[in-house]
Image: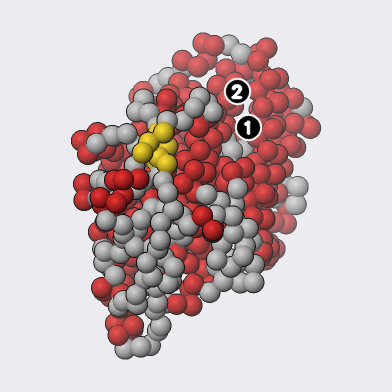
Amino acid sequence: EFSGNFLSYASLIGIKILRSTAVTRANSAFLHMEDRVDFKYDGVNNESKERKGGHGIPKVSMVPLVFLIFYEVSGGPFGIEDSVKAAGPLLAIVGFLLFALIWSIPEALITAEMGTMFPENGGYVVWVSSALGSFWGFQQGWAKWLSGVIDNALYPVLFLDYVKSSIPALGGGLPRTFAVLILTVALTYMNYRGLTIVGWVAVFLGVFSLLPFFVMGLIAIPHIEPSRWFEMDLDNVNWGLYLNTLFWNLNYWDSISTLAGEVENPKRTLPRALSYALVLVVGGYLYPLITCTAALPVVRESWTDGYFSDIAKILGGFWLHSWIQAAAALSNMGNFVTEMSSDSYQLLGMAERGMLPEFFGKRSRYGTPLIGILFSAFGVVLLSWMSFQEIIAAENYLYCFGMILEFIAFIKLRMTHPSTSRPFRIPLGTVGSVLMIIPPSILIVVVMVLASFKVMAVSILAVLVGFALQPALVYMEKKRWLRFSVREDLPDLLDPSAGAAEDETTPLVV
């Protein structure tokens, strides 16, 4: 299984799969929010619930999961053109390679370990809550949910930007506003109908979106001039645009963790799906960059959003141009439905752990988080007025805040519960784990420092709202204005010594 081992080869740290046995779960008692600080987890799925959730809904299998991750992170090479505009071909190509190494691989590895240790909806919120307490877990959930909703507000707008060349009326005014609303409602309904539907739609859209770039790359091969790859002008680099473009296109690997409770056999499926998706995402960026920057003379000012369709017209003609435009438009739909799934299941997971009011845990007859979907859709509509650059900068800032908490939680759980069962474990000790997250932590600081004052002020204000919101919810619970509860079948922590007995590692066979 070459792709199954890809994470270890790429990061030079190796991967092993841990075999674990099923265990008996203790019922979770009802606790007040301020007492839910150190709920713990045994990290093992009950085998009777592997293929279907508690509501009899089929769980997500490997192929749809790979494409759900693909759309959480990427959706194709649409939007990477700005990296060439900002820094030229060489830095763009090297940037995607380095960012994958210092950011994507560590984040994917941490997601694989923590996601198999805590295979339930809520994902990173559960990790942070277990390590740092419910207050910081709530802040993690608030910042990441808000970041996801801001990100999702981008996709209906981008869809219409691609379509308006064929339908000029959608370029502005009331027709565009109604189109955004109709598109949001239609894609929200798809999420309502079920995660398996969303997963297979993501598979179809992913294949349709990547195929034209594969064809364009083949057409470009006879025109390639290798010297064009090495064009670089360090005195004329827009570092803010360059870093934000790379960061935006290579993050959100942890988002799939909020769906872990809906995944079939997550302790085995999740790490492999992350490795396959990593190959798909990084290859999907580098292949068109390498072929297209060398096939035509590079005019940096031309490399803006949508420029790949212009290259397709030059190299292949109108048919390839139209195919890439259609793929770009539909890819935004894939990004939207997968991001909304992640956001809504995160809210459901928080409600199941008693961090949000009980009504957020309500599921539709299709097993989907009804209230979470409605809240996420409402947030998208409210934020759809923001500009493209403002959306990217604001979501990156909030995302960085959440990633800081994730890194701290990962290291703390390694220190305080080193022997607790982890069906997937990064083979590094505490020192090695700290060294692994130093480069992405430096990147986080750089991205936050480069943010404009407006973005920084708005993002910090949003974080402060979360600081006030959590105590307010605690107060509402004490006054019995809202009802909170913990789902009974969520597991508690095994004794560390019991976890140690399960840690019999078996290496993956290549």
Q: Are marks 2 and 1 in contact (CB under 8 Å)?
A: yes
Disc 1: which residue: 308
Which is nearer the eye, 311 or 37?
37
Q: What number is the disc on residue 273?
A: none
Q: Count of labels shown?
A: 2
Q: Position of residue 181 (x, y in %)?
A: 64, 65
Give amino acid for label 2: Cys
Residue occupying image coordinates x 31% and y 49%: 499
Judging by the rendered image, the residue that carries numbered circle 2 is 292
Q: Position of residue 461 (x, y in %)?
A: 31, 64
The three-letter code of the residue at mark 1 reads: Phe
Quadrant housing the N terminus: top right
- Sequence-first tag of 2 and 1: 2
Q: Is residue 139 above or below residue 17?
A: below
> Foreground: 208 or 173?
208
Q: State left or right for residue 44 relative to residue 294.
A: left
